[in-house]
Amino acid sequence: MLDTPTALRYPPLMNVARKILVIEDERDILDLASHYFEKEGFRVRTAVDGAAGLAAARKDHPDVIVLDLMLPGMDGLEVCKKLRADSATALTPVIMLTAKAEETDKIVGLELGADDYLTKPFSPKELVARVKALLRRTERREQEPQQYVYGTLRLDSARHELRVADKEVELTAKEFGLLEQLLKNPGRVLTRDVLLNAVWGYDYHGTTRTVDVHVRRLKQKVPALEHNILSVKSLGYKLREREGH
């Protein structure tokens, strides 16, 4: 069974004041969440509808977005989809809030790229704790580790080397870059545009189909990834945090 990708040789984590964007149309919940975040030292920005929240996310570059599902105008699912499709916000952690408890809503939100999910009514202390946990995970990803371990797969960035079950696997530079991006962000949806920007560069003028071709080749070379790199319809790809078939 493949374990959650492990990044090795982390430098110490930095303690920096973080910026939170809360997109919520219920004023009582908005004020309560803002109060608790401010008590914990966070810098808080707020928005009361989807369009304003999306604009604030693009302008303010928050470290975490708390996003209500039921918003006037553009709902939370559509906001989340647009956040993940924009290279400026694609990797920003998102926690979705909703009064709906149906499993399908949770699944749709997570499939669109939300990192966590909290059902109303909720404890504001739990929301703060979830945000802190999410930030710790994000900080670890930002440390640019030299090695990643995923089951029997070991990727060494410094040596540009991939070994599976202790056997070296030859990858092209782009295949290696794609795999590295997926290992850096397990469980998160990476859009094709984000992968193009990260691996091919912002000045690349090809189409997003290039990503699909390289993902297919990567799976052919590393069969262990066949069931673990998932295609997310109309968005991009994500790597399972644990092995699945």
Image (spheres, rainbow, N blue to C red):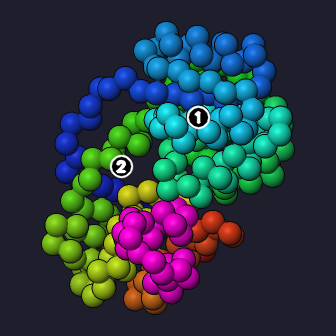
At a point 45% along the width and 77% down the height, the residue shown is: 205
* Mark nearer the viewer, 2 or 1: 1
Left or right of 200 in this view: 14? left
Q: How many numbered marks appear?
A: 2
Residue placed at 22% from the left, 67% from the top?
A: 157
- Label 1 secondary element: helix
- Where is residue 104 drawn, in percent x and y? 81, 52
Asked whether the beta carbons under mark 2 and mark 1 sit within 8 Å of each other, the answer is no
In depth, the one of 232 and 75 nearer the eye is 75
Q: Of the residues under marks 2 and 1, which one precedes in the sequence? A: 1
Q: Quadrant of residue 14?
A: top left
Horizontal and vertical percent position of residue 166? 24, 79
Q: Residues within 10 Å of mark 2 (few under 14, many from 20)?
A: some
The chief SS type of the magenta part is helix
The three-letter amino acid code for the residue at tag 1 is: Ala
Query: Tag 2: residue type?
Result: Arg
Residue 84 is covered by the magenta coloring:
no
Label 2: element kind: helix
Which residues are drawn in magenta? 190-214
Q: Quadrant of the C terminus?
A: bottom right
Queried whether the magenta region covers residue 203, the answer comes back as yes
Residue assigned mark 1: 56
Q: Position of residue 155 (x, y in %)?
A: 28, 70
**Looking at the rendered structure, which numbered label has been put on residue 141?**
2
Q: State whether residue 130 is above or below residue 40.
A: below
> Which quarter of the figure has residue 222?
bottom left
